[in-house]
Amino acid sequence: MFRRRGIKGYPSSPYMKETYKEAMVLTAFETPFRKKCTVLGIVIFVLIPFLFPPFIMHIINLAGIASIGAMALNLVTGTAGLLSLGQAGFMCAGAFTVGHLSSNMGMPIYVTLPAAGLIGAILGLFSGLPSLRLKGMYLGLGTLAMHYIIYYIASEYQFNVGYSQGISIKDPSIGILTLSDKWSWYFFIWCFVWLTGLFIANLMRSRPGRAWIAIRDRDIAAEVMGINIGYYKVLVFVVSTSIVSMAGGLYGYYTNLAAIEEYSFLLTISYLAMIIVGGIGSILGSIMGAFLITLIPYGLIYLFGFWEVSGFLKDFFYALESGIFGLMIIFFLFVEPLGMVEIWRRIRLFFELWPFKHKPLMITKR
């Protein structure tokens, strides 16, 4: 029997929604289990800077920046089903925009980051136009061409304007706070990650998000239903590349450098690995994949030093790194196509239902 609000004797269940308005509410406190997880997450978030040394904090910060780019790529590839191979180029555009505006014009971070997002939106507009005619691998090749165009322009700017080693970027300031150490950057970056995830989560539940899902599942049926698929395809590129460019600008600020060598095609492969390993179309999966892929190079360096690996393997470090990325992608595609987030979902469901084996027919408040 269905629960009715206001009828005495029928307990209110946070797991069941009666109206469309209730289903659209996005909150982390709608169930007792989520309340506990949210409080635990906040405590861990605050304690992390006091538990780890600077090097570990550096890896966590890099994973945070990678999470922003992975969530943006998952928006266009996982949600809308469009292949994009221009991730490195869009990040490069954002980093060089921030480098030029901050170093040459002295603009603050609250101006340069939105400017990087605007440049990314313009590039996304041009990158999304081929999606009106192209699909699949052909669309991916179109975005790859945009990557090399941006890469060429940035390299010409770097070497002809006098920045042979890259553009040096000073530590940004927000009021009286200067982001100069790993701990201040940690709070800033991960607050940015949280805002990006919240924005994308709400966007996926809005009209454009539902249109992107319809286009991904069956674009012909979506067009028959009246969805302007051309408009929404271009829109998802604009939104995604805007976020990616801001992530590139954030990376330039964090490393104090905008150099063309940082944005090779290997970076694009890394981001593809993040969303495939983490989980296609999942925000949490993007963050999990970003953590794992960011840790791999540092894990290899540690193993090389611990096992005293010969110089022969060290010379092929990047090739080995690329090979590991490829093997991980193949492994998850064959073993767990839904990625790490599906493994986490099964673990979470096991502890939610333990010691029971199956879901109950009706779930009430715990």
Image (tube, helix red, strand yellow):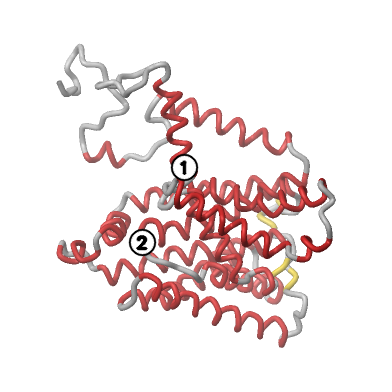
Q: Three-letter amino acid code at disc 2?
A: Gly
Which quarter of the rendering shows the C terminus?
A: top left
Q: Give the SS element for disc 2.
A: loop
Which residue corresponds to the image point at 57% horizontal and 51% vertical from the top-left?
290
Number of numbered discs = 2
Question: CB under 8 Å between callouts 1 and 2?
Answer: no
Q: Is residue 96 above or below residue 48?
A: below
Q: Quadrant of residue 229?
A: bottom left
As rendered, which of 11 and 363 lies closer to the eye? 363
Q: Secondary structure at mark 1?
A: helix
Q: What amino acid is at disc 1?
A: Val
Q: Nearer the viewer, residue 137 or 88?
A: 137
Residue carrying label 1: 341
Q: Position of residue 281 (x, y in %)?
A: 40, 52
Q: Residue at x 50, y 48 (%)?
A: 278
Q: Position of residue 179 (x, y in %)?
A: 71, 53
**Residue 182 image position (x, y, % from top left):** 73, 48
Q: Quadrant of residue 167?
A: bottom right
- Image quarter in which the N terminus is found: top left
Residue 223 is left or right of residue 117, and the answer is: left
Where residue 111 sits, quadrant-wise, is: bottom right
Give left or right: position of 14 versus 174. left
Q: Check disc 2 and report the residue beneath it.
A: 81
State which tag comes first along the sequence, 1 or 2. Answer: 2
Work out how far the residue at label 1 is from the one at label 2, CA to CA, in angstroms: 18 Å
Q: Nearer the viewer, residue 325 or 160?
A: 325
Say if 194 sits above or below 363 in the image.
Answer: below
Q: Residue at x 62, y 71 (%)?
A: 264
Question: Looking at the image, which residue sits at the far bottom?
Answer: 160
- Local packing at callout 1 (Cα closer than 10 Å; few below 14, some 14-19, many 20+) is many
**Residue 346 placed where, x, y %?**
43, 33
